[in-house]
Amino acid sequence: MSVKNSQPGAVDKDFLATFARGLEVIKSFDTQTPSMSLTDVAKKNNLSRASARRFLLTLQKLGYVKSDDKRFKLTARVLELGYSYLATLNFSETITPFMEKITHKLGESCSATVLDGQDVVYIARIPVRGLIPVNLQIGARLPAYATSMGRVLLAALPEDQLEAFLSSATLEPLTPYTVTAAEQLRSEIERVRRQAYCIIDQELELGLRTVAVPVYDRNQHVCFALNVSSHVSKVSLERAEREFVPLMQQVSQQITAALP
């Protein structure tokens, strides 16, 4: 396997295809397939059984997978990859206290997410018990197009990357309120760019109202999004805009100032 660059027939010599395929094997373990046989791994990753075996045995020797009765599972060591990323942002010491401040003042769950392909991925969460039971842990994924944090992160993309997202995204009607037309979604994202926040009203799940703001690094690049979620019966759109948005934007600025 090789990856071509923009020149026809050219090969990207800096791309390690074997390493990339190994990462894909790790990512192929998910909620639907937490454990897989050798045949399962080969089929899901479009590999021969011999190649799948080499990948799995290498990952096993490195401690990232384990085998049990001819089935393979990820080990907790995989978490080190994610925690290495979180450590670069110093979440536990620098950012989590700010998120706790939001949760304390608003009485609602606060989360931090980043964009990964067509999804947002949770990298931190301060939960509270609410009317809508939401089981979201670090590493959980949600479709970016139907979430407030997703639209905040999409609004930060360069125009060519946003166009690529809109042209390839599958916009499914998750509720009767979900935006499923690409041009309408583009308009919503442009509005988020102008106002620097996003409120989503029951597009992901009925009864769920969420607010998100971008968090910038010292160079004014968006590095992640802060999100607060609530039930529509508890928080009106007016209150969300009047009370939630200013506090979250203030905390976002404080996080930026605290980042290295």
Image (cartoon, grey):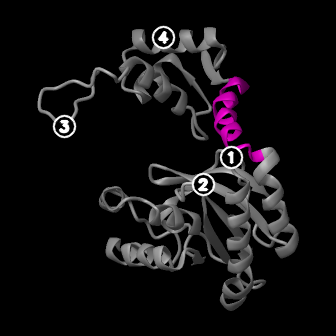
Tell me the distance, in whole angstroms, between the alpha carbons under discs 1 and 2: 8 Å
Which label belongs to residue 53? Answer: 4
Q: Which of marks 2 and 4 is nearer the N terminus?
A: 4
* Element marked by disc 2: loop
Tell me the distance, in whole angstroms, between the alpha carbons under discs 4 and 3: 33 Å
- Dots 4, 3 in contact, CB < 8 A: no
- Dots 2, 4 in contact, CB < 8 A: no
Is residue 80 a member of the stretch shown in magenta?
yes
Tell me the distance, in whole angstroms, between the alpha carbons under discs 3 and 2: 33 Å
Is residue 29 a member of the stretch shown in magenta?
no
Q: Which of marks 4 and 3 is nearer the N terminus?
A: 3
* Element marked by disc 4: helix
Q: Nearer the viewer, residue 17 or 101?
A: 101
Q: Mark 2 points at which residue?
A: 218
Q: Viewer-nearest of labels 4 and 3? A: 3
Amino acid marked by disc 3? Ser
Question: Residue 237 at x, y = what percent?
Answer: 66, 87
Which label belongs to residue 260? Answer: 1
Tell me the distance, in whole angstroms, between the alpha carbons under discs 2 and 4: 45 Å
Q: Is residue 133 visible?
A: no
User: Local crowd at mark 3 within 10 Å, few (<14), some, or many (≥20)?
Assistant: few
Which label belongs to residue 6? Answer: 3
Q: Can residue 29 be seen in this view?
A: yes
Amino acid marked by disc 1? Pro
Position above or below: 52 against 206: above
